Image (tube, rainbow, N blue to C red):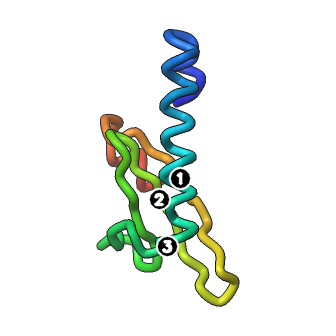
Amino acid sequence: MGVFLAAKSPAAAERIGLEIVEAIFTLDRLPNLGAPMRKRPGLRKLVHRQWLIIYRVNASAALVEIIRIWDSRRDPVKLRT
């Protein structure tokens, strides 16, 4: 995301990046905010604009692990790899 968008508009890349980081920080307070992923047990997804923030909650460690940030406009088959 960052490289492509930054080449076109550095300011837009920074703005979107900060929005995504803000959405991720929300998970610190509300770790189960995102919907469970049906085909990926243990993973959840939070949607921000067209971005999917895929993450796992480790309750015993009080930790949210970000697995991937995915542009939902891309081919979903590639997400499975």
- Residue designated by label 2: 54
- Residue designated by label 1: 68
Whole-percent x, y for residue 51 in the image? 39, 43
Q: Is residue 69 left or right of residue 38?
A: right
Whole-percent x, y for residue 46 in the image? 39, 58
Labelled pair 2, 1 in contact (Cβ < 8 Å): yes
Whole-percent x, y for residue 72 in the image? 33, 42
Whole-percent x, y for residue 34 in the image? 38, 66
- Residue designated by label 3: 31
Within 10 Å of disc 3 (Cα), the crowding (few <14, some 14-19, many 20+) is many
Q: Which mark is residue 39?
A: none
User: Identity of the amino acid at label 2?
Assistant: Ile
Q: Residue at x 39, y 62 (%)?
A: 45
Q: Is residue 36 above or below residue 20?
A: below
Q: Residue at x 60, y 80 (%)?
A: 58
Q: Is residue 54 left or right of residue 72?
A: right
Q: Earlier in the sequence, mark 3 or mark 1?
A: 3
> Element at badge 3?
loop
Q: Earlier in the sequence, mark 2 or mark 3?
A: 3
> Element at badge 2?
strand
Q: CA distance from mark 2 to mark 3?
A: 12 Å
Front residue of this view, candidates 17 and 43: 17
User: Identity of the amino acid at label 3?
Assistant: Pro
Front residue of this view, candidates 44 and 78: 44
Q: Quadrant of residue 41?
A: bottom left
